[in-house]
Image (cartoon, helix red, strand yellow):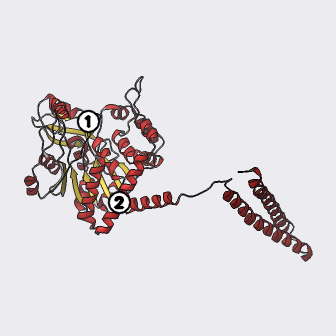
Amino acid sequence: MKFRDWLRPGIKVKRWVVFAIFGIILIIFGVNELSRHMLYNWYYKGFYILLNVTGIFILYISVTEGIKSIMALINSGYLKFSIDSKKLESLIYEKRLLVKGPKIVVIGGGTGLSTMLRGLKYYTSNITAIVTVADDGGGSGDLREDLGILPPGDIRNCILALADTEPLMEELLQYRFKEGRLKDQSFGNLFLAAMDGISENFEEAVKKMSSVLAVTGKVMPVTLENMVLKCELKNGGIVKGESNIPLESIKQKSPIDKIMIEPKEAKALVDSVEAIRTADAIILGPGSLYTSVIPNLLVKDIVEAIKKTSAIKIYVSNIMTQPGETDDYDVVDHVKAIIDHSYEGVIDYVIANVGEIGKELEEKYLEENSKLVTKDEKELQNLNIKLIESDFVKTTKGLIRHDSEKLAAVIVETIMDKKLFYDRKKIIEYFYLSERLKQKQKKK
C-alpha cells in the first residue's frame, strides 16, 4: 500500500481530534462562566449559552467525521480490526452448553476425583466438588502441621482440574521443589496456603484461588474443622491418621472394619448442603474408599442432605483394588462399605469398568497386591442398585486411571436419561456442543 493512500484519511483523523478538543474547551469555558458568575445580563448569558451549543455541535461533528476517517483507514487496509464471528458464535455456544448443564455435586478426594472433574467441566458449569480434608501425609501434612491450615493437596488438584488455565500455569502450580527445606512441597499448596494467610478462613481462600484460576463450578472443603481420621481394624486395633491407616492394615495383616472422624460432630459448609439439596445428581468417588470417599459421609450434615435430596446418587467404582484399603474387594464390597458408614439407599447407580489391562501392567500391579475390581450384577440388584458398565481404562505413565472423557460422558448421559428426561433432539445438540468444546481445549 502506497503512503499517499492512507496519508489523507490519517491526517483527517488528527484534524477531527483537534476540533473535538476545541469543542470540549468551548463547552468547559461556557459552563464555567455561567456557573461562576451567574450572569443576569441576558446579552452575556445568551453569548455563553451559544458558546456551549457551538462546542457541542463541534464535538458532534468531530466525532462523526472522525469515525468516518477511521473507517476509511480500515477499508484501505492500513488499520485491521475485525471480529471473528465464528469464534464469537462458538463462545456463545459454549456458555449456553455449560450454563444449561446438569447440577452435579461430586464428593470424595484424591487423584480419582480430580480426574473425573477434568471431564465433567466440558458438560456443565454447575459443578460443586466437596473434598475431604483428612489428609495428613506428604506436603499437605507438612503444611497442616507447620501452619495449622487444612490440608490443601486434594483441593488444589480439584481446583486445577476445573480451572481454565494455560498448560504453563498448571505446570507451575503442580511443580514440586526438589531441594532445600521446601523439598517435595507443591507450589500450588504454597499458593493456597498464602491465600489462607490473607483470608478470613480456608473457605474464603479456596474461593479466591478459584477466582484467580477461572474455575468452572465450585470447590469447597467438606468442613472447616480440623478433621482427623481414625480406623478400627478387624483385629480390634485402632489406627489414627489418614496416612497411617493403609500402612497399619498391611503391617498388622488385618483389613479395615470401620472408619471414624474427630470431631464426630464436624459441621459441613452451608453452601455444600445447599448444593446437595438442589442437585440433579450426587457422585461419590472415584478415589480411595476409606480415606477419600467415606470420610465425607461421616460429616452428618452431608449425609443428612443426601438423604433429603431428590438427586440421583451414583457411585463411581475404582478400577483397581488398593493395598491396605480394599484388598480383594469387588464392586459390591465397595458399595456395602459405603452403606455401612451411611445408610441403605445412598446409592442408586454404580458405574463400573469392564475394560481389560495388558498382561505386563497386570503383573506390575499384582506385585503391589492390586488387581482389577470385579463385579456381580445380581448382588447389586439385590441391593436395589443398577449397574452401568463401560471401558474406562486409561494408562498414564504406567499408572491406570479412569478415562476422564469417557467417564464424564457416561455420567452426564445417565443423569440426563434418568433424571432430566431431555428430548432426543436436545440430547444430540448437548453432546455435539460438548464435543466441540473438548476439541477446542485439546488444541490449546
> Which disc number belongs to residue 189?
none
Name the quadrant of the C terminus.
top left
Q: Where is residue 45 in the image (x, y as percent from the top left)?
A: 88, 73
Residue, disc 2: 432
Place residue 277 in its image quadrant: bottom left
Residue at the farthest bottom position: 42
Q: Is residue 153 shown above or below 119?
A: above
Could you tell me if the residues under marks 1 and 2 are in contact, i.e. CB atoms within 8 Å? no
Q: Is residue 438 shown above or below 373?
A: below
Q: Position of residue 332 (x, y in %)?
A: 12, 48
Q: Which of 361 and 75 is in front in this view?
A: 75
Separation of marks 1 and 2 at Cα, in angstroms: 31 Å
Residue, disc 1: 399
Q: Position of residue 419 (x, y in %)?
A: 25, 64
Place residue 371 in its image quadrant: top left
Give amino acid for label 1: Leu
Q: Nearer the viewer, residue 414 or 283?
A: 414
Question: Horizontally, is 156 left or right of 370 in the view?
Answer: right
